[in-house]
Amino acid sequence: MRFLFKTDYEDDIRLFPHSGYVVSYGILLALLLIAPYVLSSYLMSQLVFVCIYATVGVALMILTGFTGQASLGHAAFLAIGAYTAAYLQKYNVPFPVYFLAAGVLTGCIGALVGFPALRLQGIYLVIATISFAFIVEEILARWESVTNGNEGMRVKTLSLLGVTVPRDSPTFYFLCLAVLVLTIVGTLNLLRSPTGRAFVAIRDSETAARSMGVNVALYKVKSFAISAAITGLAGVLFAHKLSFISPEMFTLQLSIEFIIVILIGGSFSLHGAVLGAIFIVMIDPFLTYLKDDMPGIIAGIAATFGAGPATAGNIQSKVAAFASLNGLKGAIYGIIIVLFVLFEPLGLYGRWLKIKLFFQLFPLYKRATFKRQKIYVKSERNR
Amino acid sequence: MLDFVQQLVSGVALGCVYGLIALGFVLVYKATEVVNFAQGDLMMLGGFFAFTFIGMMGLNYWIGFAGAVAAMALFGMLAERVVVRPILGYPQFSIIMATIGLGYFLRSVAGMVWGTDDFKIDTPFSQGVLRIGSLVLAHDKLSVIAATIILCALLYLFFNKTTLGTAMRASSENMLAAYYMGIPVKRVVSVVWAISAAVATCAGVLLAPITFIHSNVGLVLGLKAFPAAVLGGFGSIPGAVVGGVLIGVIESMAGFYLAEGWKDVAPYIVLLAVLLLKPEGLFGLHVRKKV
């Protein structure tokens, strides 16, 4: 293992702690850059969704993970970004302009949502953001002159500097990847700036932050605005990827999916946002794979353990019937969320940290290193 | 004027259902500081249990009702034991996520077991109407209002006159102090979950004639019950019912007098306004913050 001796502030805020990071991220980036020429078009399309979800995940991580403001309304910000793009496109506005316009508009709306949120905490904030999302959904469905109502809007093919970029092309993927990488680097820089430090201070203790001279209200609104703006940018890409948007795409379900991204990725880090995005996007192909191949595999196992062909066939058809049940995806979602909260609250990235630490400290690893502290004294009302 | 009264009554009836779901939120929140996002789904499951007992097994309405309430009370205890107890005392975000996961699970499993169609329970009140002058009031709506009043009275007596109720109030004030005073806090929390699931079941069964039971009804109504709980102040039992009635009336009036679309957002607009002006709700305690 490598010991990192931090001797001054510059060491503490370095973007890459040591050269190992540069090498491993470099390899990862190289792999991502050659991916479109290797992977199938279906997987490429999933990878684009991973990029978009990860961008939203990073945005939500800024707000929920680093500033401690839970939000269940991010689907609304995504929707505002997507609709801004679709609306401006009708007037032949070039891509860079409406891309930035969507970011600015959602940022402003995010700040407006942030103002009422100043007085709210915990569950009240969650409920307020849910209400905001419902109101936005209803406006999108009713404001027919702009949004075309429930019939939805068609999004034209993206054209960048006079070149058309179809939604399945490698160029579109590179665009999404670039947005994701820029978002991550930007967020890392934000987090080592005074603003980011203030965010983390507010998360850890609002009162302590205030007593250190942090303007809590200002930074909360800033956090909302930044998070919303990034989500709005992701919304533009989302609209182009789907090429058709309608209000029923941006429901509470989607907001919950975004929260699941940071919950399952976990551990209050940007790695977590990306891992969670990979997880949530890949669960669908994985379930399809299970549905197609699992019955055969189980029947094969049964056959090797001495079951006759008739029994094996019977087992195969039963498993197939179970796998094609209607609500299986939702049930698996539910079980996964509950299991993660109960047994792996730090998420996938937390699991990686544990494995890494185990090998680094091999004979001396203590299980209690990552133990969370319980707070039995009443919270919220009496705090 | 007649329309107004008619809308008022149906609003109050709908509001009572919201109030009953909100009551479940508030009971659990008061006892454990846990916000149960699966409350609506418990209601849905209770409705389906009642449907199984009454509609499929052909039991008497009242026996089926009681059976569903008992089954759901046990289920509430089980859910508390498996999902909530291990994470009590952890940040609220984890608990919210755990109950959202539980809700997802219940919704999908109910969809698998009972299918995704609409179901209807025949109740003794389904057909009758009460006529006062030219005012027509359906019995099923009146029964919801009556049942809410009875349930609230029972809960009031339970909390204020019984030892267990006092123990619950004590542990909701301060869990640690109650534990030191010899109150079996874990068992008390189990009972709170049982009661909240039972109340949710009552809401589900009463609702069955008004809006049919299907696997997503819990999500829709559970989210309407949030404004009710917040409006009343999240920790207040009478507040939950009053908030529910207000939300029901607002929704019903908005549906009748305003343009289409207002009906669904009016409760949330009111909620946002309340959160802005009076975040502790109408009946909420105003607690000073200690450092």
Image (spheres, coloured by chain):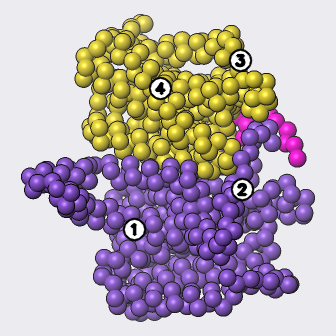
Which residue carries the number 2 mark? A115
Residue type highlighted by circle 3:
Thr
Secondary structure found at label 3 = helix
Q: Are marks 3 and 4 in contact (CB under 8 Å)?
A: no
| Magenta-highlighted residues | B279-291
Does residue B150 show up magenta in the picture? no
Q: Which chain is purple?
A: A
Give the chain of mark 2. Answer: A
Which residue carries the number 3 mark? B166
Camera-nearest residue between A13 and A211: A13
Give the chain of mark 1. Answer: A
Which one is earlier in the sequence, the residue at label 1 or at label 2? 2
Give the chain of mark 4. Answer: B
Question: Could you tell me which quadrant the N terminus of chain A lies in?
Answer: bottom right
Q: Are marks 3 and 4 on the same chain?
A: yes
Q: Residue furthest left?
A: A310
Q: CA distance from mark 1 to mark 2?
A: 36 Å
Q: Is residue B166 left or right of residue B9?
A: right
Question: Could you tell me which quadrant the C terminus of chain A lies in?
Answer: top right
Q: Quadrant of residue A312?
A: bottom left
Tell me which residue sits at (40%, 59%) in the image. A249
Q: CA distance from mark 3 to mark 2?
A: 40 Å
Q: Is residue A318 left or right of residue A366?
A: left
Q: Which chain is yellow?
A: B
Residue type highlighted by circle 2:
Phe
